[in-house]
Amino acid sequence: MHEVVVEVRVNEYTMRDRNPHVPWSPEEIAADAAACVEAGASIVHYHARDPITGAPSTDVELYAAAARAIRERCDAVVMPTLGAGTLPDPADRVRHIVELACDPAARADLAPIDLGTFNLDPYDRERREFRVDDLVYHNPVSTLLALAKAINGAGVKPMAALWSVGSVRMLEALVHRGTFTEPVYAQLTLSQTLLSTHPGTVAGMDALLQFLPAAMNVHWSVLSVGGNLLPLVGSAVEAGGHIAIGLGDYPYWELGMPTNADIVAEVVRMLRAMGRRPASPADVREMLALR
């Protein structure tokens, strides 16, 4: 396949001290999304943020406003985050996905589920210390099943975030029992700062790939939290993968002080040099059988 999906991870929990172009408000997220789609992205992943302070938010209306504004400006495949480990009740984590499902302009196309329980304590190698030391992302099987049931029930496709070999094995079990339906969209979650994941290297990526069942219809992308993903683009694409990248994970000073669209443009330049082209949102909808 010559088409490569470029997902842009526009903000995550990232502040603006390292790069001022991180979008926070729904309007900023939508403008960023439109510029990224113009540059070659097809999936937009965003977190709701307080428009003034940038603080993480669970406000359903902020999620809705961002989705509506994105769809007014472009045809991106929309993937908001869940409430993550900050919300222990699965119903709270997925509430915005369920409540917005009845509004075509605000509903999600994809929603991520992280397959496993992990420490989320970033390690700062320069300071030789953990930034926090007690943050656990708690995802027992009962939570994974509840999240998937709610997301599927809302007519949204769950995305499998794979942090470890155990995550890959969990995905295989969830596909086997029908909790996830093929074709699956999965992400290899690498990190230079979170030690619960594989490192953001080709070896780290390959260690996960070798456990993906060959018989399973899965389209996978790779991301790197706290690290530069650009050196992995060629290896990931040659291995049959897709790219998930953005200011939410890393400031990309290698490109100056870029916007998310600048980062997408650099990935697309690399893809075209390899004889590939970026997948369009329509390509992704067909690839993943999105409604």
Image: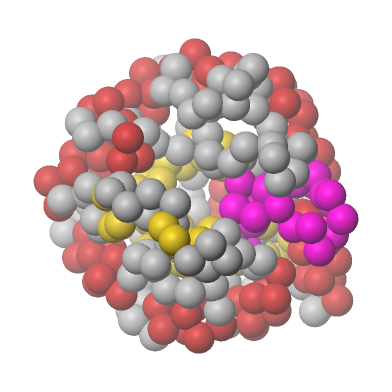
Residue occupying image coordinates x 29% and y 66%: 167
Q: Which residues are magenta?
A: 243-262
The quadrant holding residue 194 is bottom left
Q: Position of residue 189 (x, y in %)?
A: 46, 63
Label count reads 0
Q: Position of residue 24 (x, y in %)?
A: 64, 27
Residue occupying image coordinates x 49% and y 54%: 288
Residue occupying image coordinates x 16% and y 59%: 177
Residue occupying image coordinates x 32% and y 52%: 133
The quadrant holding residue 67 is top right
User: Is 206 rendered above or below residue 103?
Assistant: below
Q: Position of residue 233 (x, y in %)?
A: 68, 73
The residue positioned farthest toward the top in the image shown: 61
The magenta stretch spans residue 84 = no
Q: Is residue 86 left or right of residue 243?
A: left
User: Is 106 rendered above or below residue 161?
Assistant: above
Q: Position of residue 171 (x, y in %)?
A: 28, 63
Between 32 and 16, the residue placed more toward the observer is: 16
Between 76 and 142, the residue placed more toward the observer is: 142
The magenta stretch spans residue 256 = yes
Q: Is residue 70 left or right of residue 169?
A: right
**Residue 81 appearing in the image:** yes
The quadrant holding residue 14 is top right
